[in-house]
Each structure stands twice: as C-alpha cells, then as structure tokens.
Amino acid sequence: MREQTRRVVELDAVEALRLLGSVRLGRIVFTLEALPALRTATHIIDERGRLVFRTDGATTLAAISGADAGGSVVAYQADCIDAETLIGWSVAVVGRAEPVTAPDLVDRYRKLCAPWVDSPADNLVRLRPELISGQRIV
C-alpha cells in the first residue's frame, strides 16, 4: 500500500478563529517562574473574537494574567487531527491575557465554558488575539 501524501495549507485569520471556535479544548502556554508552562483548558470565542478560557489556581491565574495592568503575553493552541490519517488542522493565537472580573460576564462565560475535568476551574481569562496562525493538513 502506498503511503498517503499530505501537505500543509496556511489558514487566514478568519478561518483559523472559526476552526478554533469549533472545538472546546485547547492548551494555554504561559510563563511560570521564568519557565514555559502549559495547561489544558476549555475555551469559547466571544462575540468580539476574543478567546475566553477557564483556569484554576491563583498562581496559574496570576502568571497568565500578568502582574502589570497590560497582562502577560500568552499563546493558546488547539487542533483537530485524525489519528489514523493525520489529516486535520492546528490553530495558535498569541495575545495579552486579562482576568474576566465583571460579574455579568463571569456568569455568562461560566455557563458557556464548562471545565473539562471535575475541578474548581472558576477563573476566567480573556485573550485578545494579536497573532493568529493556522494550518490545515490535507
């Protein structure tokens, strides 16, 4: 049997965000104690195109949202790739993260973005994508 040939097609930002919004689970990449850290998180894309995700623990929240008012620069990545064919897509966004604190938004986002495991992942973080990249493997 001949091996399948696959190629990578770059996605534009609109398609990349659409695909990111089509899945619920991804990975947040941030700096913790001067080292790269990664956490799995559930997410949604809000009506303004911002990524909202849940996290647990004050240490993680502080590292992700940053000590200064500008927030930390973080990355978020999600994908959907078939394990058999290796066909699918991968999307990454980079931007500044800030905690969501407005009570009306907290209530709304908590309903839309359930935690992926049974944990007190009650902290909500919003990321305004500044760099959006994506690839489709075909």
Image (spheres, rainbow, N blue to C red):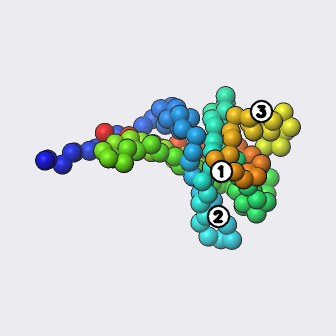
Name the spot of residue 34 as percent of width and height, x first: 65, 71
| Residue pointed to by mark 1 | 117
Q: Amino acid at mark 2?
A: Thr
Instruction: Categorize mark 2 by other alpha carbons within 10 Å: few (<14), some (14-19), many (20+).
Output: some
Q: Determine the secondary structure under disc 2.
A: strand
Residue at horizontal 63%, vertical 35%?
45
Q: Nearer the viewer, residue 63 or 131?
A: 63
Counting residues from the N terminus, which is met first, the one under dot 1 or under dot 3?
Answer: 3
Q: Quadrant of residue 106?
A: top right
Between marks 1 and 3, how big is the CA–CA gap?
A: 19 Å
Counting residues from the N terminus, which is met first, the one under dot 2 or under dot 3?
Answer: 2
Residue at horizontal 41%, vertical 42%?
89
Look at discs 1 and 3 and give the one toward the viewer.
Answer: 1
Q: Can residue 135 be seen?
A: no
Instruction: Categorize mark 3 by other alpha carbons within 10 Å: few (<14), some (14-19), many (20+).
Output: few
Name the spot of residue 10 as percent of width and height, x first: 38, 40
Residue at horizontal 52%, vertical 46%?
78
Name the spot of residue 65 as percent of width and height, x first: 74, 54
Q: Determine the secondary structure under disc 1.
A: loop
Task: Say if 19 sits above or below 79 in the image.
Answer: above
Q: Amino acid at mark 3?
A: Arg
